Image (cartoon, rainbow, N blue to C red):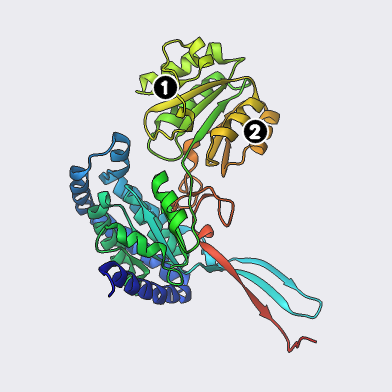
């Protein structure tokens, strides 16, 4: 006999598959109408969303960093709604001809962008992720099943109700965007084994969630590793620029995956510049875990313990290591990084080029904060996550990354000899 979770997933997947067919046939104007109507409904429901979020916050007993990820304010709700409008403004990702050629026998072959189909999204804490994922999937004509964390369930329900208003306004089926009725882990288990029902699973959350999905899923997974992001201050860095970038990269929002967790600084400039960087960050409430060479310059820094340079703090704590040169910095990143985002601050273009060529990370920045690793900042409107794998998509995942492709072949009566 089926469990409640199994029965729900069967119905939801059937509805999602039918809805994905409707979306694939819908024109861009219809999909954009749904997005804009959902944005309008979300603005109208701002007070209800914040009130539902207050219930989630009242029951939450986690860290301050995760509380910040969970919290919704009127300005954050407005940003979610604006994100839907921004997604609607993007070019239609399905209107792209990726390649077009003609064979010697006269056959014309076109590779065209197409939806993936049904996407399962499993995420933790941040309720805005559900709105972003729904918007990106609608724009790319994918149906989506969203399973948020139990700590954001009340927020998720009200946000999803606003999305449903948008779907109805555009005449699209409710099966385009669905959430489970409960937050039990059995719903995750059913999604992970839904081969043939869900085409792609996207986990977004902590290491435990991502590792569970990667180990248990029977369908393809588009996932990201931890955000062990580094900012490397090269010997040729402008000191004022370096101080501003490091402060922003660490402290703008410490709970996001693009927050810098480790500062690397060249030994040639560390004696003069590192004390100023530490003073800047301390004034912003930052704590530190420092290697011995950094502590020789700023003795009151907390000594780094084994594992600190592999820890994604997601809070106001920064690892610091003094390095000999660029190659030493690259060795440190290869040893401790998660191939997410790395930045170099330098006025030496050749050094920057060597650094960017030497990292394996999904995103590399030169003279800019790691916190720019974000779909909105990349012009994607929003993101479904930051992909750090090496297949299909890397970096912020927007509408283009939520498409696959197929071939259209046009002939004039050719038969194969």
Horizontal side, residue 26 vs residue 345: left or right: left
SS of the residue at dot 1? strand
Q: Residue drawn at (71%, 30%), measured in percent from left and top?
A: 350
Query: Mark number for residue 288?
Result: 1
For residue 95, side relative to residue 226 (left or right): right
Q: Is residue 71 left or right of residue 411?
A: left
Give the image location of residue 90, x and y in percent.
49, 58
Q: Which residue is mark 2?
A: 355
Picture quadrant of residue 354: top right
Work out whether 100 lies above or below 79.
below
Relative to 89, say whether 125 is above or below: above
Residue drawn at (43%, 58%) of the image: 216
Q: Front-most of 172 and 277?
A: 277
Kindly indicate the quadrant of the structure image that contains residue 20.
bottom left
> Where residue 38 sits in the image (x, y, percent)?
32, 62
**Can you give x and y, in whole percent of width and height, for residue 9 in the image?**
33, 69
Residue 162: x, y in percent? 28, 61
Q: Considering depth in this image, is 117 or 323 the residue closer to the camera?
A: 323
């Amino acid at each position: 006999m089926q469990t409640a979770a199994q029965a729900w997933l069967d119905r939801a997947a059937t509805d999602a598959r039918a809805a994905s067919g409707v979306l694939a046939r819908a024109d861009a104007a219809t999909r954009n109408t749904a997005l804009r109507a959902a944005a309008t409904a979300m603005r109208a429901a701002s007070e209800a969303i914040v009130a539902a979020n207050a219930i989630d916050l009242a029951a939450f007993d986690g860290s301050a960093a995760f509380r910040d990820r969970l919290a919704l304010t009127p300005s954050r709700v407005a940003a979610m709604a604006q994100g839907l409008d921004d997604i609607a403004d993007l070019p239609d990702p399905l209107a792209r001809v990726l390649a077009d050629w003609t064979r010697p026998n006269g056959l014309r072959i076109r590779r065209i962008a197409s939806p993936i189909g049904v996407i399962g999204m499993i995420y933790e804490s941040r309720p805005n992720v559900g709105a972003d994922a729904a918007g990106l999937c609608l724009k790319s004509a994918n149906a989506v099943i969203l399973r948020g964390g139990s700590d954001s369930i009340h927020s998720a329900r009200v946000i999803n109700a606003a999305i449903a208003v948008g779907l109805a306004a555009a005449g699209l089926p409710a099966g385009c965007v669905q959430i489970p009725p409960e937050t039990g882990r059995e719903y995750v288990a059913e999604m992970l084994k839904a081969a043939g029902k869900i085409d792609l699973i996207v986990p977004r959350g902590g290491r435990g969630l991502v590792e569970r999905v990667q180990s248990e899923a029977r369908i393809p997974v588009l996932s990201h590793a931890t955000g062990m992001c580094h900012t490397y201050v090269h010997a040729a860095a402008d000191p004022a620029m370096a101080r501003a970038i490091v402060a922003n990269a660490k402290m703008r929002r410490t709970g996001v995956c693009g927050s810098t967790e480790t500062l690397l600084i060249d030994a040639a400039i560390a004696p003069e510049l590192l004390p100023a960087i530490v003073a800047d960050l301390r004034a912003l409430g930052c704590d530190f875990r420092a290697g011995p060479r950094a502590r020789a310059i700023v003795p009151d820094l907390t000594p780094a313990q084994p594992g600190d340079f592999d820890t994604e703090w997601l809070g106001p704590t920064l690892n610091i290591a003094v390095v000999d040169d660029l190659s030493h910095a690259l060795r440190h990143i290869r040893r401790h990084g998660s191939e997410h985002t790395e930045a170099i601050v330098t006025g030496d273009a050749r050094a920057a080029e060597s650094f960017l060529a030497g990292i394996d990370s999904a995103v590399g920045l030169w003279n800019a904060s790691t916190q720019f690793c974000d779909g909105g900042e990349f012009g994607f409107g929003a993101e479904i996550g930051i992909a750090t794998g090496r297949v299909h998509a890397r970096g912020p995942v927007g509408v283009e990354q939520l498409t696959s492709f197929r071939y259209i072949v046009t002939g004039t009566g050719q038969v194969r000899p």
